[in-house]
Image (cartoon, rainbow, N blue to C red):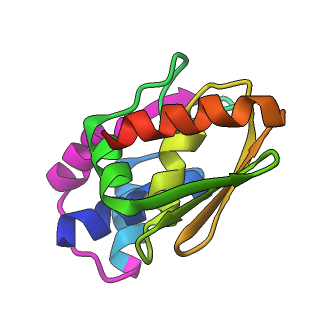
């Protein structure tokens, strides 16, 4: 459970900040009470499928993968462990998760390169996925359900 919490927080940090180095990530985690080694953070980054990519400013930062998307086995496991129910209304897909699981589950969705997804909003236990067209909702739900099986 400790590893899951730490990895969920790493996903949130990397998706929220321009993290350039493992040392920077370790400092951010330490500031939140996580005591980790460089080796642990390195393993977590690999398991979660994060890679370093170039920014417009000529620096590098960690991102959730490359095109085509690389969904790590760890992200798949977090998605499976977190999602409770998937429903929809018009072009909005609503995904209910365990408490605190929405951000990590949404990171998998955000990592997909799918022209049918306009964007996501994640709270504590709910994710809203905006589909470009209501006709694409069924296909997206089918895709998400495949990640659950």
Label total for image: 0
Residue 74 position (above or below residue 35) = above
What is the quadrant of the N terminus in the image?
A: bottom left
User: In the image, residue 128 lies at what x, y percent?
Assistant: 68, 58
Q: At 42% from the left edge and 47% from the top edge, which residue is drawn? A: 21
Residue 37 position (above or below residue 45) = below
User: In the image, residue 139 lies at what x, y percent?
Assistant: 62, 28
Q: At 33% from the left edge and 63% from the top edge, which residue is drawn? A: 26
Q: Is residue 138 left or right of residue 145?
A: right
What is the quadrant of the C terminus in the image?
A: top left
User: In the image, residue 36 lies at what x, y percent?
Assistant: 20, 66
Q: At 25% from the left edge and 53% from the top edge, which residue is drawn? A: 41
The residue closer to the viewer here, 68 or 131, is 131
Q: Is residue 130 left or right of residue 114?
A: right
Magenta part of the chain? 31-54
Magenta segment includes 53: yes
The image quadrant that residue 112 belongs to is: top right
The residue closer to the viewer here, 127 or 10, is 127
- Most extreme residue toward the bottom is 33
Asked whether residue 100 appears in the rendered view, the answer is: yes
The residue closer to the viewer here, 101 or 70, is 101
The image quadrant that residue 146 belongs to is: top left
User: In the image, residue 43 lies at what x, y percent?
Assistant: 20, 45
Magenta segment includes 64: no
Q: Is residue 138 left or right of residue 49?
A: right
Asked whether residue 50 appears in the rendered view, the answer is: no
The image quadrant that residue 126 belongs to is: bottom right
Residue 108 position (above or below residue 142) = below
């Amino acid at each position: 459970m400790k590893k899951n919490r730490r990895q969920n927080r790493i996903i949130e940090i990397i998706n929220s900040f321009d993290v350039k180095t493992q040392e920077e990530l370790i400092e951010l985690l330490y500031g939140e009470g996580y005591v980790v080694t460089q080796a642990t953070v390195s393993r977590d980054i690999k398991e979660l499928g994060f890679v370093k990519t170039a920014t417009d400013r000529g620096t590098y930062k960690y991102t959730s993968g490359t095109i085509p998307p690389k969904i790590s086995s760890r992200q798949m496991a977090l998605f499976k462990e977190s999602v409770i129910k998937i429903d929809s209304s018009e072009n909005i897909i609503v995904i209910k998760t365990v408490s605190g699981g929405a951000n990590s589950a949404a990171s998998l969705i955000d990592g997909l390169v799918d022209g049918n997804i306009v964007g996501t909003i994640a709270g504590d236990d709910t994710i809203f996925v905006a589909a470009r067209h209501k006709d694409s909702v069924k296909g997206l739900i089918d895709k998400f359900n495949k990640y659950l099986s």
